[in-house]
Image (cartoon, helix red, strand yellow):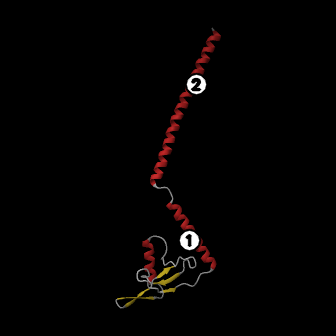
Amino acid sequence: MSFNSGSGSNSSRDWRQRKNEYEGDSRYCFCVNEGKRLKAPIRTSWTEDNPGRRFYGCKNWKTKKCRYFKWHDEPMGERAIEVINELKNENLKLIEMNSRSATPSDVEAEIGLLWDMIEGLKDESKRARTTNRLFVSILIVSWLVLIYVVLA
């Protein structure tokens, strides 16, 4: 079972978690600090069976292995669970695609290759223009020679 407080940036998650610690009715876990039991903040489950469902859970569950747990929300309907899991899976796919996207050095290398291709096309175009001019010049000279031979 996952006890994550959600996805997104840590500062955003921390703010939501602190805000939720004092929302609604308070629950207290079994941990004691300075003679007082600690409040169990509201967290969000991201398990496949209970995605998005909130619960009270000890903030020390990883370090002190406190097992305090109580649901805050009622169970969701099957369709809500299905939709949330589909959205969660799509989000994971997008994150994976984003992590595989090109790095700046890949982009620079691709730009370099494209630039080389452009320069090659420019050189080829210059050669074609030169060849074309040469062909036109030869054609004009041959017509002039033909006219001279015919008229002479």
As drawn, the label of residue 78 is: none
- The correct choice, above or below, for 50 with respect to 9 in the image is below
Amino acid found under the numbered disc labelled 2: Phe
Q: CA distance from mark 2 to mark 1?
A: 66 Å
The residue identified by callout 1 is 88
Please identify, in this view, whether the residue under mark 2 or under mark 1 is nearer the observer.
1
Neighbours of disc 1 within 10 Å: few (<14), some (14-19), many (20+): some
Q: Secondary structure at mark 1?
A: helix
The image shows residue 97 at horizontal and vertical percentages of 53, 61
Q: Residue at x 55, y 27 (%)?
A: 131
Q: Quadrant of the C terminus?
A: top right
Q: Residue at x 49, y 75 (%)?
A: 6
Marks 2 and 1 close (CB-CB < 8 Å): no
* View extreme (right): residue: 150
Q: Secondary structure at mark 2?
A: helix
Q: Nearer the viewer, residue 96 or 144?
A: 96
The image shows residue 138 at horizontal and vertical percentages of 58, 21
The image shows residue 30 at horizontal and vertical percentages of 43, 89
Q: Residue at x 57, y 76 (%)?
A: 48
The residue identified by callout 2 is 135
Q: Nearer the viewer, residue 91 or 31?
A: 31
Q: Nearer the viewer, residue 24 or 47?
A: 47
Amino acid found under the numbered disc labelled 1: Lys
The image shows residue 55 at horizontal and vertical percentages of 51, 83
Q: Residue at x 47, y 70 (%)?
A: 8
